[in-house]
Structures are given as C-alpha cells and as structure tokens.
Image (cartoon, rainbow, N blue to C red):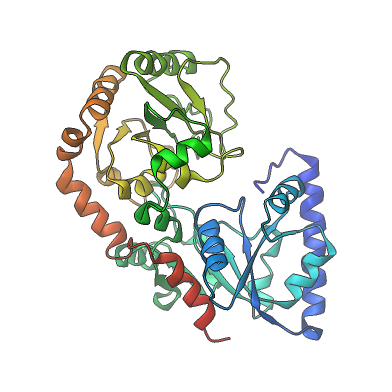
C-alpha cells in the first residue's frame, strides 16, 4: 500500500501493523521457523514480486509465497482472485512474521524496519526499476541490512556497490524476474489487448511519464503544455493515423484527466498494476525519465524520450546518455517521430540500433533470458539459514 500521509486511516493501519510487528518480535523466540513460507511485501503484487509468485506457483521449488499488504480492500480483491495474501492488520500477520524465515521486498519496510536488525529473517530486495533517478547510500540504509539485493547485470551491480553503498557479496546478479514475460512472450499482444479491453486492430502508443519526484509543482505533460493541449494533440494524432493512446500515470501521480479524449485509454496504476502486461500490448512508448523505458527496451519496439528537465534532487544514477532511442524536443518533433514509429517502426528502430544494443548489454548482459525468476527462487531455496 502506498502511504498517504494525509489519510488518517493509513496512520491507523501503520499503528496496527506496528503492533503486530512488535508482537512478532516477542513471539519469535518461542515459535518454530517455517522455511517453506516466504512473505512478499510491496505497494502492490506486481513487477518482480508478481513474477516470483507466479513462478513459484507453477514450479515445484519447495517454497510457498504469500503477499503481505496493509490495504484491506486490496487484500480482499486478491483473495477473490485466489492469491495467497495476508492482511497486515490481522493477528495472523504477527504469527506469520513470528515464524518467517525469508521476506522479499521491492520498496522499503515501513514499520517492519526493526526486523532486519533484531531477527535472523533473511531479507531480499528486488527493487522496482533500473533507475535514471539519482540515489546514494542514504537511500538504501534499510536494504544495507538485507541478506541480498538482486540486480539485472554486472554493470548494475557495480553501481550498487560503488554508488549505493552495498557490500560486494550482498549484490547478486539474477536478472529481473518481471522481464521473463517480456522475453518469453508467453502471451501474444492480441491476447493481452483482449484481456485489457483494448482495440485489437489499432497501433497502441503508450504515454508513461514519471511522477513529480523532487520537483514540486512539476507537470507530467511536457513542453509547457497543459493536459488539454497535450492530450488533445495526441488524440488528434490518433484519429488521423488510426491508432490509440494509452495514458499510464505513475502510481504516485493522482492524475484523473479532466476530460475524455477520443482514442485515449487511461490505465491507472491502481486499476491496472501489472505494467508488463501493458508493455506487451504497446507498439510505441513515449516517456521522459521513467524507468519503465528499460523494461520496454527488451521488446525491441520504438521508444521516444521527451526532452524535459529531470526531476531528481540527487542527479542521475544512469545519465541522459542512457536514453537509448530518439529524443524529441518539442510537440512538432514528437508528432513527426510518432508518425515514423507507427508507420515504419523498422526504420525508426534502425536509427539507434547500435546504441540500443550497447545499453541493453550493459543493463542486462546475458540475464534477460527468461529464467530470472527461477534464479531468484533458487537463491531463496538454496541459501544457508
């Protein structure tokens, strides 16, 4: 659950969850560990956490994964889908944490922060994206207490060690579990479109901007344009070229378009948490500094980067040179680039082919092979207690 500091109910939930964590700490000396049960914790069951859950369900790996959430409504929703899920406000949460042998997270720990310090629970971090955003060691103080952090390549491991302050032995190259679906293509774009209720016969352009980050008042719409001007122009382009626009606001962007635009589909993170599914359905990506670009890179489809100021207080982890495809500097240039990407994607891709290949090798190496989730689960099963 994403914490809203202005929501009193969220503070109540943090308090109840914190009480369960305290109870778990008291119970642990008297409870037997359960090595078969692994807890997953994050805002939503998506990304790398979802990929691990699904892989464990289909493979006999000797562990059973369960998602832990503070969001009671989301808990009920997942239960209806048949997902093993644990509500953090339930007494069962204290019992599960008291017996926990391993926990995998993709953000932070909230009120579970004392557990890595005061227990022998094995903590693993899968993070939630390869970052443009600048981080330093202070941002990962919680993860520095983890057993391992799993990353996508030796190049990214070096970044974690040299810039983010991790020990060499903490950072393990496994690949990102969520990229397996992109590489293995177990679902066709047509199948995904049908599941999402998207047009089956139109090219789909995904607009996925990052959130305001450290730049208060920053608009997600580029080039000094407001929502009406930018989305109206994309809508007109879609009408003219026979395509559709997918608007994908970041989880931290409370964006509710003020008007409906023809041929524009809003796929919010809250309603559609599975980003990989949306990427599989999309033909072209338009983004600014969003890490979603590095997932889309694996699909070998055109990406257009909006040349807008970065909203990062600490600079970059991966700099502007990692924008592996065409960078557009205004609305007219964007429209021309979109036309090429929609009408002649092979030509659009050929213009930056060498740069794309080089960056793909740096960020993934040989680990975008469709086996990343299995490697992660092997780490869980085979690691010494």
Q: Position of residue 353 (x, y in %)?
A: 17, 44
Left or right: where 40 falls relative to 299: right
Residue 48 at x, y = what percent?
Answer: 50, 58
Q: Nearer the viewer, residue 267 or 215?
A: 267
Is residue 13 left or right of 184 when viewed as pictured? Answer: right
Instruction: Note whether residue 290 is visible.
Output: no
**Compared to 181, does 33 lie above or below?**
below
- Which quarter of the rendered picture does the C terminus lie within? bottom right
Residue 237 screen position, x and y as percent:
34, 16
Residue under the point 25% across and 43% down: 324
Q: In the image, what residue occupies the spot 55% across and 72% down?
A: 146
Image coordinates of residue 135 in percent, x first then y, are 44, 54
Up/down of 365 relative to 211, above or below = below
Number of numbered discs overlaid on the protein picture: 0
Drawn side of residue 212 relative to residue 130, left or right: right
Q: Residue at x 60, y 53 (%)?
A: 45
Say whether residue 78 is visible: yes
Q: Residue at x 38, y 49 (%)?
A: 295
Up-down: is 60 above or below 79? below
């Amino acid at each position: 659950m994403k914490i809203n500091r202005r929501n009193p109910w969220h503070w109540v939930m943090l308090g109840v969850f914190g009480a369960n964590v305290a109870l778990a700490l008291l119970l642990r000396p008297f409870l037997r560990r359960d090595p078969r049960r692994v807890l997953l914790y994050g805002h939503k069951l998506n990304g790398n956490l979802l990929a691990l859950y699904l892989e464990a369900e289909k493979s006999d790996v000797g562990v059973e994964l369960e998602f832990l959430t503070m969001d009671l409504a989301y808990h009920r929703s997942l239960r209806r889908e048949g997902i093993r899920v644990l509500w953090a406000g339930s007494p069962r949460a204290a019992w599960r944490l008291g017996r926990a042998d391993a926990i995998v997270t993709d953000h932070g720990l909230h009120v579970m922060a004392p557990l890595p310090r005061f227990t022998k629970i094995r903590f693993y971090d899968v993070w939630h994206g390869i970052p443009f955003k600048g981080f330093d060691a202070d941002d990962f103080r919680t993860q520095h207490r983890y057993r391992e952090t799993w990353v996508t390549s030796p190049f990214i491991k070096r970044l974690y060690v040299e810039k983010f302050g991790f020990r060499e032995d903490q950072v393990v190259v496994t690949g990102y579990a969520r990229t397996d679906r992109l590489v293995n293509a177990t679902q066709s774009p047509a199948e995904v479109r049908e599941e999402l209720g998207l047009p089956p016969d139109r090219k789909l352009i995904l607009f996925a901007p990052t959130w305001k980050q450290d730049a208060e008042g920053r608009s997600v719409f580029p080039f000094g344009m407001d929502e009406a001007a930018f989305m109206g122009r994309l809508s007109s382009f879609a009408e003219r070229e026979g395509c559709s626009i997918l608007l994908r606001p970041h989880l931290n962007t409370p964006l509710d378009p003020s008007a409906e635009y023809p041929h524009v589909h809003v796929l919010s993170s809250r309603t559609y948490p599975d980003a990989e599914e949306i990427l599989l359905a999309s033909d072209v990506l338009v983004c600014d500094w969003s890490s979603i670009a590095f997932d889309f890179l694996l699909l070998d489809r055109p990406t257009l980067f909006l040349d807008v100021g970065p909203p990062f207080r600490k600079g970059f982890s991966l700099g502007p040179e990692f924008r592996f495809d065409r960078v557009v500097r205004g609305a007219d240039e964007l429209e021309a680039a979109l036309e090429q990407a929609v009408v002649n994607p092979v030509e659009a891709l050929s213009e930056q082919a060498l740069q794309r290949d080089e960056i793909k090798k740096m960020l993934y190496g040989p680990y975008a092979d469709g086996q990343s989730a299995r490697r992660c689960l092997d780490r869980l099963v085979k690691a010494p207690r």
